[in-house]
Every structure is written in C-alpha cells, then in structure tokens.
Amino acid sequence: MGDKYVATVRFHMEGVEAELYGRIMEGKKEAGLSVPDYIKQILKEYFENKDQEDSRNEWLEQFGEEIARVVEQAIRNCISGGNLNAMGTGTVLIADAAAAGLPEQSEEIPEGALDFLNGME
C-alpha cells in the first residue's frame, strides 16, 4: 500500500448506527460510488463547509470588534464632551440637553465611566 492509509468503520446493526449505515448504502448507490469513495466524498464536503464556516465566523468576529471599537470611541467622545461625527458624513449629532432631560455639559468625565469603557476591551 505504501502511501495509502486505511480507516475502518464499524456499525452496530441496530439503533442510530443501523440507520446511518442504511443512509450510506442508499447514498452510495445514488452517487454510483463505492462505500469508501462515498464516505470520502462526504468527509471532503464536510471539511470544506467547516473551513468556510470558520472563515465566516472569523470575519464576523473581526466585524464585531470593529463595530465595538467605533461605538466605544463614539461613547468616549460623548462622555468627554467632544462632537460626534455620524458615520463620517459630516453630520454632527447635537442633542437638546434640556429637552432630553440630560444634565448640563461638563468637562469632567463621570466617575467610573472610563473604568467601564476600559472593561469592554
């Protein structure tokens, strides 16, 4: 055999394994493949999908981190009294503090605010 490897799979002929074995037998007939080739095809498709899923999850994680960074910076700007630029469009968000029931603007950062924000990292 040289550079080939052998994997043996055994099935119980009752319960879930019997059903799985039956599905493999049906699938191999439909695909026109031998059992080993059909199982290799199933494994190949599984791992290709798994790799795509891992890549998608990595992208979503990076996207989430970027969103968290932008939101954190926006909150820091609001807390420090800086103007907040909405999505880089040049539109500055200004709140009517009295109408919103907000306290007067202050140069001081509320106690514990930065500790809270630093805990988000």
Image (cartoon, rainbow, N blue to C red):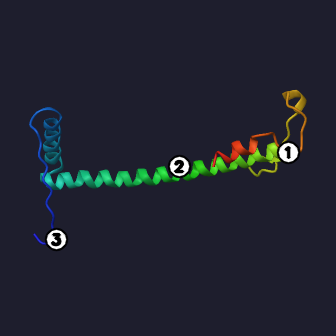
Of label 2 and label 3, which has the lower sequence position? 3
Q: Label 2, on which residue?
A: 60
- Is the Cβ of the residue at disc 2 closer than 8 Å to that at disc 3? no
Q: Classify mark 1: helix, strand or loop.
A: loop
User: Which is nearer the eye, 48 or 84?
Assistant: 84
Residue type at mark 3 is Asp
Of label 2 and label 1, which has the lower sequence position? 2
Q: Residue at point 64% right, 47% down?
A: 68
Mark pair 3, 1: CA separation: 68 Å
- Which mark is nearer the camera, 2 or 1? 1
Circle 1 residues within 10 Å: few <14, some 14–19, many ≥20: some
| Residue 33 visible in the displayed image | no
Identify the image quadrant of residue 18.
Answer: top left
Q: Classify mark 3: helix, strand or loop.
A: loop
Q: Can you tell which mark lies on residue 10?
A: none
Q: Residue at point 86% right, 40% down?
A: 94
Residue type at mark 2 is Leu
User: Which is nearer the eye, 28 or 71?
Assistant: 71
Of label 3 and label 1, which has the lower sequence position? 3
Vertical position of residue 5 compared to residue 89: above or below = below
Q: Label 3, on which residue?
A: 3
Mark pair 2, 3: CA separation: 39 Å
Residue type at mark 1 is Gly
Q: Classify mark 2: helix, strand or loop.
A: helix
- On the picture, is 65 further left or further right than 76? left
Circle 3 residues within 10 Å: few <14, some 14–19, many ≥20: few
Q: Label 1, on which residue?
A: 81
